Structures are given as C-alpha cells and as structure tokens.
Amino acid sequence: MQFLIRRAKLDDVPTLVKLARMVHFINLPADREIIANKILQSRSAFARAAGAEVDDQPDQPPPKVKPGPTGVRRSVAAQLAPDTVTPHQLRPASELRASGKGRGKSARHSPQPPAAAHAPVPASLSPVQAAGLSAAKSDVFMFVLEDVEAAACLGTSQVISHMGGPGNPNLSFKLSRREFFSQSLQFGATHIVATLYLDESGPSELGGLILQPSYRSHKAKLGRLLSLVRFHFIALHRDMFSDRLIAELMAPISPDGQNVLWEYLGRRFINLTYAEADRFCQYSREFMLALLPREEIFLTLLPPEARAVIGQVGPETMPARKMLEKIGFRYKDFVDPFDGGPHLEANTGEIKLIRDTRLLTLGEPINATAATRSGIVSRLESDGEFRASHVDFAEGATTVRLTRESMKQLSVEPGMQLGVTPMEPPRGSPRKAPPGRKRA
C-alpha cells in the first residue's frame, strides 16, 4: 500500500467535510463552502511557493447574524488591505482600545508602509467597518494524505503562513497569578486571571490535522507523516513563514460540539452559540475584540467544570500535543479566548526537522539495499503541484538517490530538485541508549 502527501483538491471536499465532522477544528469546519474556499486559497498558496503567477479567487462574504437579546450584531464583508509583519510583540488589548481594530486568524501580508498599518481608525467608521479595512487572508497550505492505490483521501493538515498582523492582531487570553493576603486574618489566596492579549507579529500557525480513525494505528505512522510534512514544507520555503510557530490546540468539546468555557464565559459577552461564533470567525474576528472585556477576568468566579478545561486538550488532540512538545513546542500560559485550549509555540529556526531539511538534486536510481536513510522526500512542480512521501533514500553532499519505486510514486526523474528531511539515523549507526542504561 502506497501513501502520498499532496495539496488538497476540490474533489476532496466531500471527504474533508466527513472528516471535519469527526473532530471539531476551527481551521477545518464541517462546511462545504468554507472548505472549498480554503482549498482554492491553498492552490494559490502552493502556486506562489513555486513562483507561479497567481490570480486569487474572490473572497466569500460572511454569514449574516440576526439581532439577539444582547443587541444588534452586524455582518461584515471583508475588504482586503495589505499588512506587514513586525517583530513579535504581545501587549494588552487596552493599548489598542481606542482603535477599534480587530484580529483575523487568516491575514495575508503584502508590502505596505508601516505607518499605514498603524494608522488610526477614522472617527466616521464603526469598529466593524474599520476592522474590515485591515482584514485580509493569509497563505493557507492544505495537505492531504492519499491512499494511492485506492485514490482515497485519508486525512489532512494545514499550515497558515501568518496569523494576523499590524492592525489585525491575533487574540488570546494570557493567564497570570494574582496573590492577596490579609494581615488581620493572616491568610491569603491566589487567583488565576485571564487578560485579553493582542499579537500583531503574524506568527505561522499549524492546524487542521485529522486522520481517518481506521488509519490512526497504522504501522506507517500516517498521523505523524501528516503532521511533520508541514515542517518539511516550511523549511523549503522559509521566506514565506514567520520566525515563530504557534499551534492553537482544541480544548475538550462535547459530542454535540459545545464547549463549557464558552457557555460560562464567552457567551456572556458574545451571545452566539459556540458553533455560530466559530463559523463567523472564518470571515471576521473583529467581534471578539469589540465585545470581549479588556479588564482582568478572575477565573475563580467560574464553576469548576469551566476552569477544568482551561489549558487542556481533549483525548483526540493529546497525541498531537505530545508530538509538538517532543519536537520543541512549549505552553506559555496563553489560551484560546473561545474554548480555553492551550496555545503552544516554538522558534522556527530551533525545530530540528526544519534545520535538517535540504534541497537536493535527484540522482540515478538505487536498489533498496543501497538506501541508508529514511524520511520525507518531496517535489514541488512549477504550477504548484506538490507530492511528498516517507521513503528510503541515500544522500550525498548535493544529491539524493531513490529506488525506482519511490521515483515512480513521486513522479520524479534524475536532475530534479527534491526536498529531503531525514527522520531516522543512518542505518548501522549506534542508537542512543535509553535513560539510566549504559552500553556495554
């Protein structure tokens, strides 16, 4: 059985919708229109990575939201405007309180003078309108795992080149401790508070990883391949991605798609169901900045069941969290303002998989016995078509050699440039001894 990673295609929409219904993901909602639009974005992004001319598809308008008991909520038609990326900076939302600027988790960054990116919002524009002026879509790279023999889509993963940017911040809750002590009573208390934070640095985000349940225990470790191919791709197109990577992991979600933190906290300020708010986020994040409080929120006021999910992930997300932490991602007390899921982050240049990835020239084919390494090998065509797989190979200073079977699987020929990420030590080399044991 052969497995191939490729870019997503419109033919994958029905399968991806079914996959999206299995696990609740912000980056992979169970909506045909949204997924199809993401695939079109992804096709353009892969073409840009290959250096091809791209004529972007028009954006879809946001869904209309009817007035509710807390007041009138307006729909927003995103008007694209370029942004620029500045060095990493986190600051309290109170610093931008007067601007009315919102965040967009999908923001494309094109050249624009920094002064324009931070220009004040005209007084004649409402916060909703003003946010639309700085909203834009980022490059989204959507990968699909395919069973080559059955031509079946088995899973998907994504990487977004930049999340937010100047005037279009990415939002999170920063958790911190507040300690109180009474001299007269001679005892005190420690409280955890959440403060809305804005990140205008435009970090790259990993997300949307899901694999069909029947393949999750496959000996080929297909979930691992789907996850790690994103680091392989980032390394090969380093200039398209940020120096900081984030992964916004999902907190525990009920079988009917509800989140307890949203019900006790978020919905007190944004009177939408979790699903409605999630769907609207695909088009605009302005309403979060406009309606969520800027002041410290004492989480002690929440019931235990709501506090229990903060910074936690569901059982289906735990393997992904462990994998990310193993390769260098860390939790730094930032959580999602919707569901309380942890935000993990890492410096792009410190990820070993990225450091080890190289662009090599394909040499003449070899026999399977001549292969000395195994890992991810990929080919990006001039039109943006992408193919990658975990294969055996032999590498030199500037070349890589594959078996004929692997060359056929990847549709490559000698002389082509291939991306190569070794994932296993050279065969015959001594393996690292387990902790607490020494080699004889």
Image (tube, helix red, strand yellow):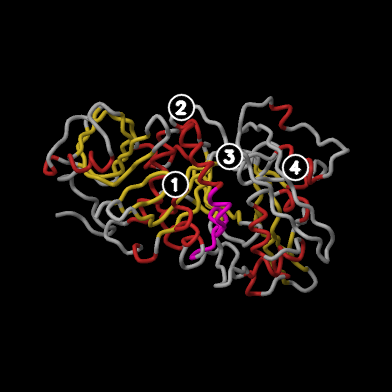
Residue found at x 18% / y 40%: 403
Judge the density around disc 4: few (<14), some (14-19), many (≥20) Cα neighbours within 10 Å.
many
Instruction: Residue 232: give x, y in percent of width and height.
Output: 38, 41
Q: Secondary structure at mark 4?
A: helix
| SS for callout 2 | loop
- Depth check: give the residue in front, 84 or 272: 272
Q: Position of residue 111 (x, y in %)?
A: 62, 26
Q: Earlier in the sequence, mark 1 or mark 4?
A: 1
Q: Secondary structure at mark 3?
A: loop
| Label of residue 138 in the image | 3
Q: Which mark is residue 131?
A: 4
Q: Amino acid at mark 2?
A: Gly
Nearer mark to the viewer, of 1 and 4: 1
- Of the two numbered discs 4 and 3 on the same chain, state the one appearing first in sequence: 4
Q: Would you call the spot at circle 3 few (<14 residues within 10 Å), some (14-19), or many (20 or more)?
A: many
Q: Amino acid at mark 1?
A: Ala
Q: Is residue 125 above or below residue 341?
A: above
Q: Is residue 87 left or right of residue 330?
A: right
Mark number displayed over residue 51: 2
* Residue 11 lies in the magenta stretch: no
Relative image position of residue 135 (x, y in whole percent): 68, 40
The residue depicted at 65 percent of the width and 53 percent of the height is 281
Q: CA distance from mark 3 to mark 2?
A: 17 Å
Q: Marks 4 and 3, how far apart in space?
A: 16 Å
Count of numbered circles in the view: 4
Measure how far apart labels 2 and 1 are at the Cα level.
19 Å
Q: Which residues are magenta?
A: 22-36
Mark 2: few, some, or many residues within 10 Å (few <14, many ≥20)? few
